[in-house]
Amino acid sequence: MIYVTDNQAFADVKVFVVSSQGFADLLVYKQTNQAFVGANNGQWFFTPDQAFAKKKICFVSSQAFADITIFYVDSQNFAGWINRSKKSLFD
């Protein structure tokens, strides 16, 4: 359960979206139903309500300011961690 904030000060994690999965720390699949979200496995459900979020993220405009880089995938089968050292950011 992910909530997106525009203010970096309120974010738990700063995220940059890369254009190639080869540069990503995490491959993310956007779930349409929160019931299918796994435990820190790259399947994200974006909630409009901050109270229900497990993590608050802020998308940043430069990779230099990001805690993590992500790439969106079209299938939940491809979602998951590339750089496992960053996994603790979403625990």
Image (cartoon, grey):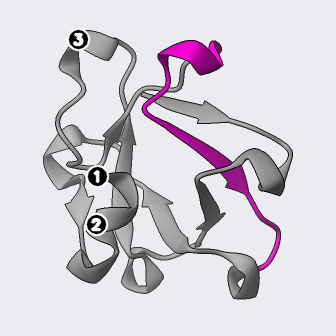
Foreground mark, 3 or 1, reads 1
Q: Residues within 10 Å of mark 1 (few under 14, many from 20)?
A: few
Q: Residues within 10 Å of mark 2 (few under 14, many from 20)?
A: some
Three-letter residue code for mark 2: Lys
What is the spatial separation of the Cα atoms under label 3 and label 1, in whole angstroms? Answer: 18 Å
Element type where label 1 sits in the image: loop
Question: Residue 26 appears in which quarter of the rendering?
Answer: bottom left
In this picture, is 68 found above or below 72? Answer: below
In this picture, is 49 found above or below 64? Answer: above
Residue segment shown in magenta: 48-62
Q: Are marks 2 and 1 in contact (CB under 8 Å)?
A: yes
Residue 37, position in %: x, y?
A: 24, 26
- Report the residue at 63% width, 20% height from top: 50
- Report the residue at 69% width, 82% height from top: 63
Question: Residue 45 appears in which quarter of the rendering?
Answer: top left
Foreground mark, 2 or 3, reads 2
Q: Is residue 20 left or right of residue 41?
A: right
- Report the residue at 24% width, 52% height from top: 79
Q: Is residue 13 left or right of residue 9?
A: left
What is the spatial separation of the Cα atoms under label 2 and label 3, in whole angstroms? Answer: 21 Å
Element type where label 2 sits in the image: helix
Of marks 3 and 1, which one's residue comes earlier in the chain?
3
54 magenta-colored: yes
57 magenta-colored: yes
Identify the residue position indicated by label 3 in the image.
35
Which mark is on residue 87?
A: 2
Three-letter residue code for mark 1: Asp
Which mark is on residue 91?
A: 1
Residue 77, position in %: x, y?
A: 13, 46
Three-letter residue code for mark 3: Ala
Q: Residues within 10 Å of mark 3 (few under 14, many from 20)?
A: few
